[in-house]
Amino acid sequence: MKKWLAIAISSSILSGCSSFPWQNESEAVDVAVQTIPEVPVASPVDEDSETKQETISEVAEVELTPQQEADLWLRIKRQLTFEAPEVPRLVSQRNWYLNNPTYMERVAKRAQPFMYLIVDEIERRNMPLELALLPIVESAFDPFAYSHGRAAGVWQFIPGTARHYGLEINWWYDGRRDVYAAPHAALDYLDALQKRFDGDWLHALAAYNSGEGRVANAIRKNKRAGKPTDFWSLDLPRETRAYVPKLLALADILKNYDDYAQHWLPIDNKPYLAIVEAQSQIDLAKAAEMAELDLDTLHHYNSAYNRWATDPIGPHRLLLPIEHAEKLQAWLTTADNKDLVQWTRHKVKSGESLLVIAKQYHTTAKAIQQANNISGHIIRAGDHLLVPVATRDLDDYSLSADQRLVTKQSQSRGAYKVEHEVVRGDTLWDISREYNVNLRKLASWNGMAPTDPLRPGRKLVVWLPQSEKPSGVVRSLNYKVRSGDSLARIASRFNVTINDIEKWNQISRSNYLQPGQQLKLYVDVTRLNTQS
């Protein structure tokens, strides 16, 4: 269905319309004047008054381009090209979306700040506009989404693929959550995939979800068996078999949303965020203050930053609503780099290292080296170092990695919470078995994926049901076997069972213990038997 704009409208009506994607009324009038075709007006001598009235009231119509639509969803809708076959896998996904309209409203609200940037880049590359809907399938447009497969961000990159396509991941910054850089990397990846699969976008999308090797193997398997090799005929993982239909279902609903009576929360077809580049590391709280924007809101739009500031070595890019970006840019024009973060002067004590000092001030050794022009790690007692520090309490940076973890671990998931301190050799699998909890749930409670490595000293929370009330405070520890020790003696001392020790350490009571041997134990520290 074509979209038309009546140009010959009275100026009073035009000035009262706020939905046109122009900047102001005068610009709208200029465009109208430039696009109205010349309409010949007959001489009043040659026609009667009725004919004259018909000529004067004639309205010239000009077709809007997709880019001129007032609603960004309509801009996307008019450029959708993928077919949506009426197959059960697609129909079931479409029915789910149609039966859950509030879900789409939530997604549209999340997408609103970012969608214009995505659509603009897809059009610039002349790629299918269906790809703009992919973040709905991947993450529901949650920039902090983290999956069980270690995928993060709106576009759900895993670490290896992210780095391959130029997204840095470190203590300060995770490019997978960069709402500006990640779409560029995702489109680079998708373009490479469609070329890998000879322009077949359904194969490319399936590969984006499950890996190109798996899709290529499925195609080869069908070829050898003389079967069709289209997406619908391939033997792919269950998740992937649903993944592509989800995208096609969304595109089909949008393309035919009048028929489906589906309401899509409107998004203005105009830029919402603007980019501001600082020249050096900048405290997010300082940026928010100067932009006159709430800190949480600024951090939400810049979700790639793990800590209280941008990475000392960059990027220092910030995305802000346009009016706030202008205020921040004005301040940066006159500010000195030393004004972008707060500094403290630290006198080095005997035995201190850069790592120790960095941990104390919640920064990194590299940041201290950069600030003090130090190339090595050698520092001497009595030296003075300038250290960048946060301008506000770290608790105020509620969307930093540390504070998000605190919030996640504090969410009640059971009747009782047990804190487990990780020791060397611990795995999430071992800990889940020890407490008899689901591995994926344990990982989720702690903002992790099941395959994430554990660092000694990390604190994990374990939620137990009412039926497994903990008798005290359970801790994990390493016990060094002494001369004369036996499993029975160790079990008695730590109030555990021999079976437990065997299970935790994958040993048998038929094996002799050796002095110096390390055993892993999980003990209730409130019920320790301190007598040997």
Image (tube, rainbow, N blue to C red):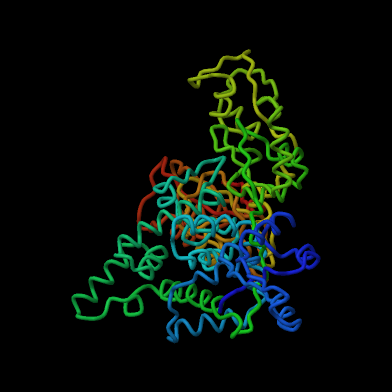
Residue 147 position within the rendered picture, expressed as x and y whole percent measured from the top left: 52, 61
Tell me the quarter of the picture where residue 356 sits: top right
Residue 208 position within the rendered picture, expressed as x and y whole percent measured from the top left: 41, 63
For image coordinates 34% across by 68% down, the residue present is: 200
For image coordinates 57% across by 52% down, the residue present is: 179
Which residue ends up furthest to the front in the rendered image? 45
Viewer-nearest residue: 511 or 334: 334
For image coordinates 52% across by 48% down, the residue present is: 181
Viewer-nearest residue: 472 or 25: 25
Q: In the drawing, does residue 33 fall left or right of residue 63?
A: right
Tell me the quarter of the picture where residue 412 sits: bottom right
Viewer-nearest residue: 321 or 55: 55
Viewer-nearest residue: 532 or 172: 172
Tell me the quarter of the picture where residue 190 sits: bottom left
Q: In the drawing, does residue 409 fall left or right of residue 83?
A: right
Residue 92 position within the rendered picture, expressed as x and y whole percent measured from the top left: 50, 84
146 up-or-down from 481: above or below: below
Q: In the drawing, does residue 433 fall left or right of residue 57?
A: left
Residue 212 position within the rendered picture, expressed as x and y whole percent measured from the top left: 33, 62
446 up-or-down from 253: above or below: above
